[in-house]
Amino acid sequence: MTRTGILLCLSCLFALLAGCDPVDNPGGGGESPIFPEESYGVEIGTFYLENRNITLRLMDITSLYEEVGYLSWSVPVSHVSYQDLPTSLKEPVKQYALGAPSQVYRMKWRGETIYHLITYYMDDWQGVYKPSGERIVFSSMEEYLQFLQEISDVNCLLLINTEVVKSAEGAPNLLEGTWQSDWLHLHHDIGGSNGSGTDDQVELYANLPFSITEVCHFKKDGTGYLRTIKTLKGGKQEVSLDPFTYYLTNYQTSNSLRNYSYICCFSAGDTIEYTARSLDDFSKVFDRAFTFVTYPWYKQKSDSFSSKKGDPKYGIPAKDDKVPLVGRWYGKDVASALTFGIHSYTWVFRSDGTGYQLSGRQFYQSFAYTVDGKNGSEFQLTLYKYDTGFFIEDGFWKEGDWTYSYVRQPVPTGKPMKAKVSEDGNSLELEGCNIRSADFSLTPIVFQRVSR
């Protein structure tokens, strides 16, 4: 898995709530005290970045590890706090960490002690420093690779996790109103040269015998609903209706960007934190994230499906002995290579062939799924994700010589996945969901059934 792919699975666990009672200022500014977020390690400091209009908290989480993966091999951890680093290195380390979770290594090279700073968004060869703070410049990749052959006594000194300090105090609620998302109206080139992206119509998963439309309505009083309409090719519709209470948890602005985080407490029991981002002040559209392609939410004057009723489904699916995959499944890990901190994941598979995935309490994607084969306790699935971002591997670009170009008539397809359910029906393993150890070996995350 690439670093980009691993980043998509980062977050921390929020305890599942059976329901939520309203608090003061529902849907408005201020953080609700009933929604604490897990945080690990020792705080280094909190920093406001004016150019991004964001406040970040840097956390020293080195004590979670005894060994970690350095480039392609395992090395021991010899914890040195940020305050005890060489004075001239503190600023480079801080700047790295404000960009993304970062690692600090100490090693010997040609008789000298040197330091290697590694973060997700910088090339590894740019982060080699002397204790004086002087950066060691490599004239070629070959020279950097030779450096890696010559180093010795490598130790990890510091792992810094980067957290956004959330606040919605005084935020205007631009979410109010009715929003609709479907499998037809594609939004691509988000944040492109004109700053607004391009709208197209590309049918998502035309090979499936149904499509899905969702309508989300936010009221001023902090209540609302999510209506899901599953339309089969023959015209028959299956509808679910999920009332919720919602709370703004974060609001950020940067130039034309408006970015919300908000928590939905569904009446059936689920509690999920979502994001909504817009470059037009939420006057017409919002996206979950600014990836190359999304199927976004468009503002509507009214809910055209308001006459359609249905039962709620955003709760814990009951155990089904005939279909043991159905249920809510929770797992977590402390990976020692490329990732930071304690991470938890939730998968929900419903009996109607839909579900969703969380990273911590944060919504990652909805999906439809089909069971294409079964061999004992093993299932062959295909996942058809939606309400999320789409990437190169999803079929929207073709790769050229160091270039990528948008496919004008893409044919989006689902992703095959294997699943294995334990004999008692209470444990689940999913292909691609692994713990990556310090030596880069992989062991499956074992998800446990959540029953309450």
Image (cartoon, rainbow, N blue to C red):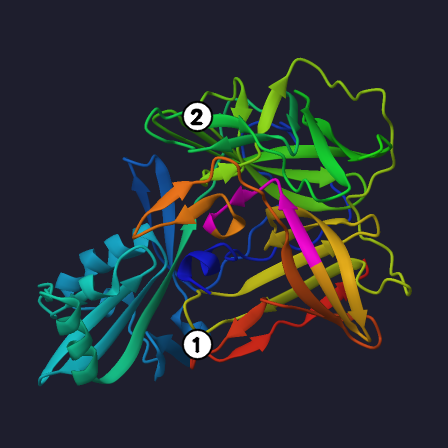
Q: Residue at x 53, y 27 (%)?
A: 200
Vertical relation: 320 (above or below) 256: below
Q: Quadrant of residue 323?
A: bottom right
Q: Is residue 381 visible?
A: yes
Q: Is 390 contained in the magenta span?
A: yes
Residue 266: image x %, image y %?
Answer: 75, 39
Q: Nearer the viewer, residue 113 or 123?
A: 123
Q: Secondary structure at mark 1?
A: loop
User: Is residue 307 or residue 176 the one in the foreground?
Assistant: 307
Q: Residues within 10 Å of mark 1 (few under 14, many from 20)?
A: some
- Looking at the image, tell me whether mark 2 or mark 1 is earlier in sequence order: 1
Q: Is residue 351 magenta?
A: no
Which residue is rendered at x = 25% and y = 65% of the image? 124
Name the residue type under label 1.
Tyr
- Which percent across, then down, holds residue 381? 72, 60
Q: Is residue 373 above or below residue 278?
A: below
Residue located beneath label 2 in the image: 279
Front-most of residues 349 and 170: 349
Q: Residues within 10 Å of mark 2 (few under 14, many from 20)?
A: many
Residue 244 tag number: none
Q: CA distance from mark 2 to mark 1?
A: 40 Å
Residue at which label 1 appears: 65
Main secondary structure type of the part rendered in magenta = strand
Q: Does any portion of residue 33 appear in the rendered image?
A: no
Could you tell me if the residues under marks 2 and 1 are in contact, i.e. CB atoms within 8 Å?
A: no
Residue displayed at 80% across by 69% down = 374
Residue 7 image position (x, y, % from top left) = 45, 56
Q: Bounds of the magenta span?
A: 382-392
Residue 209 image offset from top left, x and y in percent: 78, 42
In the displayed structure image, the side of residue 209 where residue 406 appears, left or right: left
Q: Residue at x 79, y 22 (%)?
A: 305
Q: Amino acid at mark 2?
A: Leu
